[in-house]
Structure formats: C-alpha cells, structure tokens
Amino acid sequence: MDSQQHIADQVREAVESRTALALRGGGSKAFLGEATQGDTLELAGHSGVVDYDPGELVITCRAGVPLAEIRELLASNGQHLPFDPPAFGDSATIGGTVACGLSGPGRPWAGSLRDYLLGVKIVNGKGEVLSFGGQVMKNVAGYDVSRLMAGSMGTLGVILEASFKVLPRPAKELTLAFECAQQDAIQQVASWSARPIPLSAASWSNGRLKVRLSGATTETEKAARSMSPDECTDDTEHWLDLREHRDGFFKNETPLWRLSLPATTPPLDLEGHCLLDWGGAQRWYSGPESEASIRETVEACGGHATLFRGDNAVPRFHPLPKAMRLLQDRIRQAFDPHGLFNPGLMGPAA
C-alpha cells in the first residue's frame, strides 16, 4: 500500500469512529497554536518529489519531503523558494511549511507563501482525496481554494502534495547597515520602498538598521552606493539568523510576541525589546507588558498580535471579529464537517 492510500485510509477510519486526529509532519513548529488532542497522524513518511522541471519554474512534492531537501534541489539548479520560509529545525517538511504559512524576511517585496502556492492535493474531513489548483499560475476560474491551505494549521485537511512556483536566485545580494533610531529606520525603509531600488529585506534592532539588496550585479551595486551605508557586505548570515530565530534577540525565556502592523506605524509604546522585520510590518516583541496591553496597543494601530512562544495560559491568537470567526467556522465545516483535524489548535469555534 502506498503512503497516500495509507493516510487516506487512516482518515476514513477516523471519520467512521469520529476520532480526532493530531496531524504531525516534522514537528519543528509544534509550539505554534493552542494545544490540540487526538490520535497522532504521522505524515513525514509521505515524502518525495513528484515533478520538477527547472525550465518550467515549478516543483511538485509530497507533504513529508524535508524543506531542506527541496532547498538543496532548487539551489543545485540556481533556483529558490522566493518566500524563503523559516524551518525552525532540520525536521521541517513542506506540508508543515504550507500549513503554518510563514514567510521569510523578504515577504513584503517577494510575496508570501500563499502567492507561490499553485496547487494542493488533500484528504478532507470526509476521507475524500481532492485536488485544487494545478501547476501553472493561471489555472482556476473563481476562488483558488488551494491558497486556503496556507496558514490553515492543518484544520482544513491533510495535505498530501503541494506545487510551487519557484524563481532563479538573484545574481547578487548585498547587506547594508546603518546606525539609526527606530523611527528613522521606519521612515527610511518606507522612502526606499517607493524608489526603484532592489530592496529585498529590512530589519532593525538595537539602533541598527540592516537592508538587503537583491538583483542583477550592476543595479545592486549601484543602488548600494547611492544609499551611503555605514557598512556594506555580501554576508547573508544575518538574514538566516533572523529567519530561523537564531539572532540573539530571540534567545531569552521571555514570551515572544509576533506583531502584525502597517509598516509605517511609529514605534510602539511598550516596555521591553522590539525587533522590526519586513521593514516594520512584522515586529517581534518580548517584555513585561500584559496580554491585554499588547493587544490593545497593536489593535489601536490597525494590527494584531500573536503569542508566538511561551506562556501557555495566554490565548495564542488575536481575537477575531465575530463575522470573521463565523466565516472561518463555515469554511472549516465545509472541509472538516466533524471537526476531526487538529481540534482547538486555532482556538475555539465561534
């Protein structure tokens, strides 16, 4: 019996017995979300590349294939996943990457995981194997259902396969550093983003703004000179450390909050430490402020706050407006009518 059939059979058995299932890929992001219960459905064994044609810039792989293996394969052909997802460990799989929907430092300029997800094959909550999307950018009329899987945390179905658009790696990348205050960094990145500069990432922490330029060698070097940085290198280690949370900012026992905000939002009035990513649109906060204070402050700026790590007594996700919660529940009901997949992982139903 092949692994796809085995997974589908396990889901059908769970449907018949109304047994909840806790979906597990590599387990590298098991800390995300609320606690869930159910029989563990192991997916890492469903591995392998189904189809990859470098000339077509598309790769299709099974959910259990390690993310590191895909990165290595693409790199050998001078290509990459433009959304540059974090792995948070060597065991990360493609299925878990899609389910968590996280993107790397270049997300505002390159796009998100959802933008490059062309199609998926899943097992839904009725035990049916369904395919959505395809292997080209324009393949649907109406809503692209496959993109619902990005960030769904496994609550809509068991991902069996995923197809992605890939792109050539940039010919040149430079990292520029500037000494400046947080507000100055926010304003400067906004100014650069409005200009024809090959900006591909921007972060700020402890009075130091770092910017990445990616593109053709000539235009990248020319842009770097025009920006007059305090320092300019071709070292990419900073962006890997930021993506994988290996930066010193993340190495403490204080709860870590992920704040999503309009990029030009001024520095927040929160006691503690803040690191800006995505040019200010994603901010990481650790400090003594209460959950209520953090969420009220962020919501007043038009954003939302997620408890990323730590303090299991605090709700992970920002409360949704009632209309949005009802819509989310209707989507879950359509895909998983018995509520068997990762129950409670994204919080209680409306």
Image: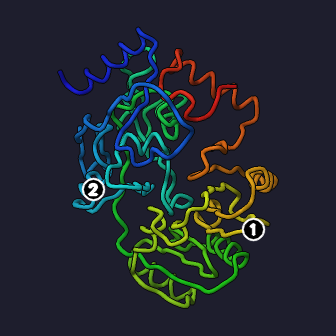
Please state the horizontal and vertical placement of residue 343, each as a whole percent of the image.
53, 27
Q: Which image quarter: residue 204?
A: bottom right
Q: Residues within 10 Å of mark 1 (few under 14, many from 20)?
A: few
Q: Disc 1 designates what residue? A: 271
Q: Secondary structure at mark 2?
A: helix
Q: Which residue is mark 2?
A: 74
Quarter placement of the N terminus = top left
Task: Name which residue lies at 69% across and 56% down.
Answer: 261
Give me the residue at 55% from left, 91% from top.
230
Tell me where residue 278 appears, x and y as whole percent: 58, 63
Q: Is residue 216 above or below residue 100?
A: below
Distance, label 1 to label 2, CA atoms, is 43 Å
Q: Nearer the viewer, mark 1 or mark 2?
A: 1
Quadrant where the C terminus lies? top right
**Residue type highlighted by circle 1:** Glu
Q: Amino acid under label 2?
A: Leu
